[in-house]
Amino acid sequence: MVLIAKSLEEMTEEIGDPRFSYYEIFTPEKDIENFEERTYAGNPYVNVKNGFIDRLMDELNLHRTSRWEAGSAVALALENALTRGHLCDNSLSVSVKVITGDYGSVIRIRDSGPGFDFLGHIRERIEGKYYGTGRGSGILFFDHCGPQISYEGNGSIVNILVR
């Protein structure tokens, strides 16, 4: 299981000697060099450009496979925050915080949207039910990617633990 119920504090205990290495609050309409809007099947999406993900991954000092898995998870979490959490309102801000330690890093992404029932999705997975309901497949991806993923609060905070 990769989609888990862990707090930020529990994740930072696992990485050993946690310290902040990166923090940014951004607003897509003011930061157009890192974000772009597109339409897929008639629905609007906000995409994160590779340069932003590459810059963030440079903070983590990961080997190639972990870097790709972490970058994919971060890109999806950011795109979910911007597209689903903010309903493509590019005037709303998202924060990204990276906490590094001796044994890994935690990337925390927070949006200001209404959130979603992430505990219901975890419960459905444990019960063997199909839990990939909704407009996208982010939960299914997070449950099968390399990093550990956990949500907090009302579902508008995602923590990604990479080693």
Image (cartoon, rainbow, N blue to C red):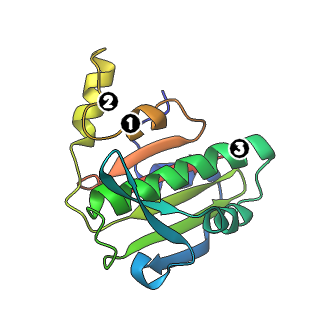
The answer to whether residue 51 is visible is: yes
Q: Position of residue 86 (x, y in %)?
A: 28, 64
| Circles 2 and 3: CB atoms closer than 8 Å | no
Q: Position of residue 52 (x, y in %)?
A: 61, 68
Are the residues flagged by discs 2 and 1 in contact, CB closer than 8 Å?
yes
Q: Residue furthest top?
A: 128
Residue at 19% in and 60% down = 114
Q: Amino acid at mark 3?
A: Ser
The residue where tag 3 is placed is 66
Q: Which mark is residue 137?
A: 1
Q: Amino acid at mark 1?
A: Ser
| Mark 3 secondary-structure assignment | helix
Residue situated in front as seen by the camera: 20 or 23:
23
Residue at horizontal 38 percent and vertical 64 percent from the top? 110
Density class for disc 1 (Cα within 10 Å; few <14, some 14-19, many ≥20) is: few
C-alpha separation, residue under disc 2 versus residue under disc 3: 24 Å
Q: Nearer the viewer, residue 106 or 28?
A: 28
Mark 2 or mark 3: name the one nearer the start of the chain: 3
Which residue is depicted at the point 69% across and 63% down?
54
* Front tag of 2 and 3: 2
Q: Nearer the viewer, mark 1 or mark 3?
A: 1
Report whether residue 8 is seen. Answer: no
Instruction: Report x, y in % for residue 70.
Output: 62, 48
Q: Farthest residue in the front direction?
A: 42
Labelled pair 1, 3 in contact (Cβ < 8 Å): no
Q: Earlier in the sequence, mark 1 or mark 3?
A: 3
> Marks 1/3: CA distance?
21 Å
| Type of amino acid at the residue the image marks with label 2 | Gly
Can you tell which mark lies on residue 132?
A: 2
* Secondary structure of the residue carrying numbered label 2: loop
Q: In the image as oriented, which residue stretches furthest toward the right?
A: 63
Q: In the image, what residue occupies the spot 21% across and 43% down?
A: 117
